[in-house]
Amino acid sequence: MDGNEEPGRLGEYLAARRALVRPETFGLTVGSNRRVPGLRREEVALLAGISADYYVRLERGRDKNPSPHVLDALARVLQLDDVEADHLRGLGGTAPRPRRSRRLDRVPDRLHHLLAAIGVPTFVESRHFDVLASNPLAVALSPRLVPGENRLRSLLLDPAERDFHEDWERAVEGFVALARHTLGDDVTDQRAVALVGELSLASARFRSLWARHDLRPLEGGTTTLHHPTVGELRLHREKLPVGDVILVLYYPDEDSDAAEKLGLLASLAATGS
């Protein structure tokens, strides 16, 4: 490779995903002389039906505009899901990349009213995962949900988060994949660049997960949390885009143990206990 040659975002993504595919998946023999994790470049090319030389050019940044047919074939070989395949197409120039808003994060007045009225832990975050506003029950659920905190930084760097989440490792993997999808590789987004740089220096786990290029869309789910006062809480989570910000709600099943515990937590928060 030429000393000045850069693989670019497409090449980096191909290399990262290639390293995650087990050769045995395609019936390839893994011998003692295999020096790379995952598939070799020539194996990807063979499975995708393209020449090895052409694939090398793609991964090394010499060709940055593959056809949709080639990208679809590579997505199949690299076992990408729909979100990851769309990301690959965007890097390859066959799908429009999302346009990033340059507006300052601002919480609409109606969301402040909603936060005050809603009876479950609720907060508003930016696309960079900065907490912008929260209701008292959210802060009672976790002191890391006060405005000014960054949820991704807290999850990775605050030791209390390891005890708070029943499966901290799974939570981290999902959150970093969401950050990859949300923040992307937009070098003009100074807030995103600074956050990724900070976490890359501070967390080896973040560096390894970020290098995988896993992607996860913005979506809800169910999680189990361990609160130091009321104990285990099984809660559903919804993430709702509102303009440039995200409204996040945690809520229990009706008449569940978690609902009773949230009621207790709300009473304690109201009395300042």
Image (spheres, grey):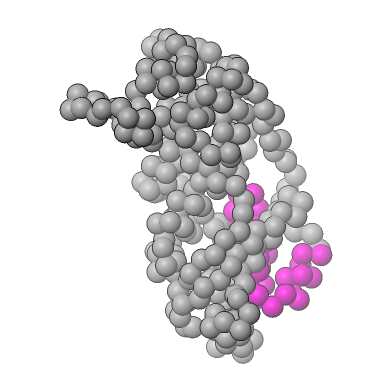
Identify the residue at the far right of this view: 110
Pick whichever, 132 or 221, lies toward us. 221
Q: Is residue 19 shown to the viewer in this render?
A: no
Where residue 83 sits in the image (x, y, percent)?
Answer: 58, 40
Residue drawn where x is 64% and y is 86% of the image: 270
- Which stretch did the figure color magenta? 110-135
Where residue 102 sits in the image (x, y, percent)?
Answer: 72, 40
Tell me if residue 133 is in the magenta stretch: yes
Identify the residue at the far front of this view: 27
Give the quadrant of the N terminus: top left
Pick whichever, 232 or 245, lies toward us. 232
Q: Can you tell which quarter of the image residue 222 is in?
A: bottom right
Residue drawn where x is 45% and y is 74% of the image: 226
Q: Is residue 229 above or below residue 29?
A: below
Q: Is residue 29 above or below residue 103?
A: above
Residue drawn where x is 75% and y is 44% of the image: 103
Q: Can you tell which quarter of the image residue 37 is in?
A: top left
Give the quadrant of the C terminus: bottom right
Pick whichever, 46 or 152, lies toward us. 46
Q: Can you tell which quarter of the image residue 70 is in?
A: top right
Where residue 228 sits in the image (x, y, percent)?
Answer: 44, 79
Identify the residue at the far left of this view: 32
Where residue 231 sits in the image (x, y, percent)?
Answer: 45, 80
